[in-house]
Structure formats: C-alpha cells, structure tokens
Amino acid sequence: MNALLEPHIEMLPMCQSDLDEVLTIEYSVCPFPWSRANFADSMVSGYSCWVCRMDGELVGYFVLMLAVDDAHLLTISIAEKRQRMGLGARLLRQAMRVGRDGGAKALLLEVRPSNEKGLAMYRHFGFQQIGVRRGYYPAENGREDALVLTHPLAEVTA
C-alpha cells in the first residue's frame, strides 16, 4: 500500500474539548452509555483517559484507572463505522503500555458476555478469565453478568 494513502493515527490524552465527539461514539455503540459527567469525573480524578484520532477524526477512546499493582480498563470503544480496522487493538495496546509504564503488573477489565466483538479481541490478545461479577451490568431485561479478564503487562511489547 502506498504510504501516502495510509491514515495518520494518533493516540492523545483526552481533554474536555474531546467530550462531544467521545459522547457521540459512546451513545452510538454502548447500550448503557457513560454520561458526560462520568468522563469528566474520570479526567478530574486523574484516570488515564485517551483518544484515538484517524486523520483528525476522533474514532475511539479508553479510560484506565491505575491502582497499586493493577491497571483497570474502565471503558474502551471504537466508532461503529471504524470497527474491524485494527483500531481497537491499537487502543488496547496503548492502554496496556500506559498501565505498564504506570507500574501496573496486570491489566484487569470487565466485559459483557454478549459483547462478542470485545471478547474476541481480548481472547486474541491472550486475556484470561479470572472471575464473574453477577448482575454487574444493566441490561434490557434486568442485569447482565460481567466476565472479569486479566492480562500480565510484563508481556506487552512497545
């Protein structure tokens, strides 16, 4: 492929001015989306919040909470029209690097069993299930469990 035709992809810290674009994606891909306040509070609390831009267009984001030994991936999403392009994998690698660089030994996350795309990506990366949180997520007809997955960060390559 001609290098001039390849998109320019950037990983950047999320800022307040990104929130309208973040929320557009959040409300289009998440059945029970985070609010503007959830994202704003995450930034104020010092969580590691990142966006992915492709040729200037905000196409994805994640929020990562660093704890003593673990990094907890709170949310990660890619715009629906930009899925299946490897951008989710790029964002996940970035989250893993940020966690490792922050001193975390492992990345922990929860995922809905019904999120087949997310589960496939996490399994591709070698995440292992370590538990189930019963009734963790709101769902159309009550609550949905969360699968708890982890990945050691020592195995992440830059």
Image: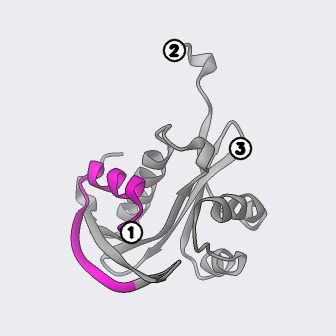
> What amino acid type should be assigned to the residue bearing mark 1?
Val
Q: Could you tell whether 12 is left or right of 116 in the image?
A: right
Q: Could you tell whether 36 is left or right of 144 in the image?
A: right
When asked about the image quadrant of residue 146, the answer is bottom left
Residue 130, placed above or below residue 78: below
Q: Contact (CB < 8 A) between labels 2 and 3? A: no
Q: CA distance from mark 3 to mark 1?
A: 26 Å
Label 2 vs 1, first from the N-terminus: 2
The span picked out in magenta is 113-135
Pick the front one: 53 or 129: 129
Instruction: Check disc 2 and report the residue beneath it.
Output: 1
Horizontal and vertical percent for residue 1? 51, 14
The residue drawn where x is 62% and y is 19% is: 5
Q: CA distance from mark 2 to mark 3?
A: 21 Å
> What amino acid type should be assigned to the residue bearing mark 2?
Met
Would you call the spot at circle 1 few (<14 residues within 10 Å), some (14-19), or many (20 or more)?
many
The residue drawn where x is 36% and y is 45% is: 158
Would you call the spot at circle 3 few (<14 residues within 10 Å), some (14-19), or many (20 or more)?
few
Instruction: Check disc 1 and report the residue beneath it.
Output: 111
Would you call the spot at circle 2 few (<14 residues within 10 Å), some (14-19), or many (20 or more)?
few
